[in-house]
């Protein structure tokens, strides 16, 4: 039974590739349906090939406006969460102080909490304070839930860093500021970058917490949610495809740059 | 890279001792922590307190709410919505098991078998994250559409007869059934399973596999006795990272399900944003939180010992 033997030997590879297919299937569908010309409001069945949506990605009312709001919120949430999270991470790794355990659990809890619970509790806070729901309440919420992820990413990087490098800098008469800027920060940078990237992706894609705390502000995920009831324009698939392509290209580019840098060092 | 647990060896016998921290430096960690921790206290911890107080209030939107310690709200909420609670646990549990079954081979493939394809597969696992998850969930509506290729194939293979008999699907439909919701949940949280599994598999010393082989262990035995136990940290964090968000999710149940597949997240969302019954919504959300914290604590305690392996 050569076939059965072959199957047995490659079972893991086959199962893994099936999973990969499952993960990528929706992206394939999104890409294919970005070239569809739907009849009626819903873009769920294939009708006819067309590049109309690609030629006019902002041709749907309010979609690009919501995209721009999402990008702004994601940008500022990333800045806020990265700065606050990096500071916490350094404090946790570099210093011994009382209340470390409490701080650690306060960082861990938002990641272990279902989003809908955080969303609902924030809404009760804002309602009680009489805050105007909108851009600022969304931003506050996004910084809150991105913060923990930045702390974890930066902490992992700073922990694996050799403290002797900083000692060496001090031995060579570098001032604390110089040591931090020229030794510590460059080494921690990949962790900070990972945390920032994660924040951006989480904030840009968040729906549940935003849905509760947005008031009448419409972010891109909320536009997509609304369109699921009203009828999905093809342009949504164009944006989805473009986002996927940009992500793949960015990762490939960073890998090429990384490889070149490693080769130069060698 | 093991500075995590071991202190670095002294450079030489004459290496200078660590200077005691200066007085001024003692406050540094607190200044570093202050803004971020304040943010979490005000926008994470304080809201929980507000929610707790809301859950014991009575009143109406027009006349205002007052804290009356009306604890019966909890009982009423639980007795009215226990099917949705149960459904959330069942769906999230099924999705978690499916994620583990599907995710393990892929994580194993990336860690041990991918070779020069490793980076590419990693990119393909992470990149879908950047297409909004709502767009990708909507794509499942197309994939599972009535009369579509997937439903047709399942029908030809008589799979739908079995799943309908089990109550997972109804007739020759997959959309708007529990199967579609679990399929969406599994899909959405699969990367959260794969990444921790991969990072714990990748850390396993490949010499352990060789040693097992040298001791005449068959591949399956090696997996059962060496690889899987060593990947337990990844299994535990992966299952938590999929189960917790899946139990609170309402997007998949709303987009791919029907009124018969509503989960507790859907109820909380409707109570809060449409019916505006804040005390009930707050009580439901607290029960969900407490239930999950309890299950997670028990699970961590259980898996922390060797019992689970």
Image (cartoon, coloured by chain):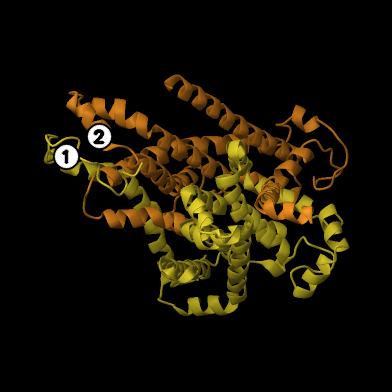
Chain colours: A orange, B yellow
The residue labelled by disc 1 is: B25
Subunit that carries the residue with mark 2: A
Residue plotted at (57% across, 30% down): A250
Q: Quadrant of residue A266?
A: top left
For this rendering, which residue is in front, B31 or B3?
A: B3
Q: Residue at position x 19%, y 39% from top?
A: B10
Quarter of the picture holding the N terminus of chain B: top left
Instruction: Confirm or deny contact between disc 1 and disc 2 (CB under 8 A).
Output: no
Give the side of residue A226 with respect to residue A69, left or right: right
Tag 1 secondary structure: helix
Q: Is residue B250 visible?
A: no
Dot label at residue A164: 2
Q: Nearer the viewer, residue B263 or B240?
A: B240
Residue A105 seen? yes
Image vertical order of residue A22 relative to residue B226, above or below: above
Q: Position of residue B88 (x, y in %)?
A: 60, 68
Output the chain of dot 1: B
- Select label 1 or label 2 by which is in front: 2
B154 or B188, nearer to the observer: B154
- Mark 1 vs mark 2, CA separation in Å: 20 Å
Of helix, strand and loop, which one carries label 2?
A: helix
């Amino acid at each position: 039974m050569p076939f059965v033997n072959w199957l047995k030997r490659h079972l893991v590879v086959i199962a893994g590739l099936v999973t990969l297919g499952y993960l990528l299937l929706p992206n394939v569908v999104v890409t294919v349906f970005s070239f569809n010309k739907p009849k009626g409001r819903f873009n769920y069945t294939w009708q006819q090939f067309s590049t109309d949506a690609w030629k006019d990605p902002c041709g749907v009312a309010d979609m690009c406006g919501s995209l721009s709001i999402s990008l702004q919120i994601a940008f500022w949430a990333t800045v806020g969460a990265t700065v606050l999270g990096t500071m916490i991470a350094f404090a946790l790794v570099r210093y011994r102080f009382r209340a470390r355990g409490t701080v650690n659990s306060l960082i861990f809890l938002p990641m272990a909490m279902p989003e809908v619970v955080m969303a609902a509790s924030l809404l009760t806070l804002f309602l009680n304070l009489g805050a105007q729901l909108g851009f600022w309440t969304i931003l506050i919420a996004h910084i809150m839930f991105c913060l923990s992820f930045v702390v974890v990413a930066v902490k992992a990087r700073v922990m694996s860093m050799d403290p002797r490098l900083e000692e060496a800098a001090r031995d060579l008469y570098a001032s604390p500021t110089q040591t931090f800027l020229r030794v510590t920060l460059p080494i921690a940078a990949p962790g900070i970058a990972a945390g920032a990237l994660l924040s951006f992706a989480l904030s840009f894609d968040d729906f549940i917490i935003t849905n509760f705390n947005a008031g009448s502000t419409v972010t891109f995920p909320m536009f997509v949610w609304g369109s699921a009831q009203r009828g999905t324009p093809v342009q949504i698939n164009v944006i989805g495809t473009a986002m996927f392509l940009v992500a793949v290209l960015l990762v490939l580019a960073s890998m090429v740059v990384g490889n070149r840098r490693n080769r130069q060092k060698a | 890279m093991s500075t995590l647990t071991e202190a670095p060896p002294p450079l030489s016998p004459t290496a200078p001792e660590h200077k005691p921290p200066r007085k001024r430096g003692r406050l540094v960690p607190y200044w570093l922590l202050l803004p971020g921790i304040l943010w979490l206290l005000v926008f994470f911890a304080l809201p929980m307190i507000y929610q707790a107080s809301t859950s014991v209030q009575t009143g109406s939107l027009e006349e205002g709410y007052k804290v009356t310690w009306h604890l019966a709200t909890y009982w009423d909420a639980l007795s009215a919505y226990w099917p949705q609670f149960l459904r959330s646990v069942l769906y999230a549990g099924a999705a978690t098991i499916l994620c583990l079954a599907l995710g393990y081979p892929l994580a194993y493939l990336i860690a041990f078998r991918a070779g020069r394809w490793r980076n590419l597969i990693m990119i393909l696992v992470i990149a879908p994250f950047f297409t909004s998850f709502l767009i990708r969930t909507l794509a499942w509506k197309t994939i599972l559409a009535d009369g579509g290729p997937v439903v047709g194939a399942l029908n030809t293979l008589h799979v739908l007869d079995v799943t309908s008999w089990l109550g997972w699907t109804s007739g020759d439909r997959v959309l708007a059934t529990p199967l579609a919701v679990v399929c969406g949940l599994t899909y959405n949280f699969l990367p959260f399973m794969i990444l921790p599994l991969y990072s714990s598999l990748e850390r396993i010393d490949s010499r352990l596999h060789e040693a097992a082989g040298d001791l005449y262990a068959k591949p399956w035995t090696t997996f059962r006795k060496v690889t899987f136990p060593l990947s337990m940290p990844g299994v535990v964090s992966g299952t938590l990272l999929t189960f917790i968000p899946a139990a609170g999710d309402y997007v998949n149940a709303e987009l791919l399900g029907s009124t018969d597949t509503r989960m507790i997240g859907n109820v909380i969302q409707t109570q809060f944003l449409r019916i505006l019954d804040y005390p009930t919504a707050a009580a439901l959300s607290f029960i969900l939180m407490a239930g999950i914290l309890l299950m997670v604590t028990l699970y961590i305690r259980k898996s922390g010992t060797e019992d689970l392996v």
